[in-house]
Image (cartoon, rainbow, N blue to C red):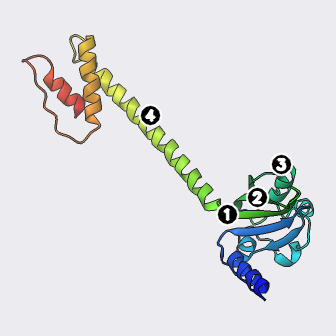
Amino acid sequence: HHSKQTISEMDDIIEAVSDGIYVTDGQGNTLRINSACQQITGLIKEKVMGENMRTLVQKGLLSASCSLKVLETKQRTTILQNTPSGKTVIVTGTPVFDEKGEIKRVISSTRDITELNQLKSLLEKERQLSHRYYSELLGSKMKHMNEFQKDFIAYSEKMFKIVEMAMRVARTDSTVTITGESGVGKEVIARLIH
């Protein structure tokens, strides 16, 4: 009776987990699949129960099998899978060994990362766009720099450093005080910052 209760509790836990859970034996035959795994992968319990993972891959129900990789490597393995519904999922398979050191079970945990991939792609596009805008802005600044160069009578190393500092300061939202003797080019620097 106690054993039945433990099994029932185990079933409840497996069903309650939001990650997909897929269990095979040491030969890669399907023993269990929870509801979350069915929702994530699109696999149907009745069609996969007892089926070998090799058969499911051959039928095109899975792009690859984490369970088979675990059986090959005899260690915990993580793979990316593409489902027939067009989702990208990340699967981590963990081997369970018997007293002889042979794999008796492979427990695979599945997570849908489709949205994560879409977000990554969106961020990459934003980054490229931002880089393009920055390049255009830089080009525009350099054009202005060429125009400003006409205002300089001398363009020494010290003056170059001042111009560089002025351009750095121009990117910030702060008040700037420019000091110096009459005729050193304070107005030119002020216009550059502006």
As drawn, 105 above or below 179: below
Q: Residue drawn at (66%, 63%), measured in percent from left and top?
A: 112
Describe the element under mark 2 as helix, strand or loop: strand
Residue placed under numbered mark 1 in the picture: 111
Q: Amino acid at mark 4?
A: Ser
The first of marks 1 and 4 along the sequence is 1
Q: Amino acid at mark 2?
A: Gly
- On the image, the x and y values in percent for residue 67 come to 82, 59
As drawn, 17 above or below 102: below
Q: Amino acid at mark 3?
A: Thr
As drawn, 194 above or below 58: above
User: Crowding near pointer 3: few (<14 within 10 Å), some, many (20+)?
Assistant: few
For the residues marked 2 and 1, what is the alpha-carbon distance in whole angstroms?
12 Å
Q: Residue drawn at (18%, 24%), measured in percent from left and top?
A: 188
For the residues marked 1 and 4, what is the alpha-carbon distance in whole angstroms?
39 Å
For the residues marked 3 and 2, what is the alpha-carbon distance in whole angstroms?
11 Å
Q: Quadrant of residue 7?
A: bottom right
The first of marks 2 and 4 along the sequence is 2
Residue placed under numbered mark 3 in the picture: 73
Q: Residue drawn at (89%, 61%), measured in percent from left and top?
A: 26
Q: Quadrant of residue 43?
A: bottom right
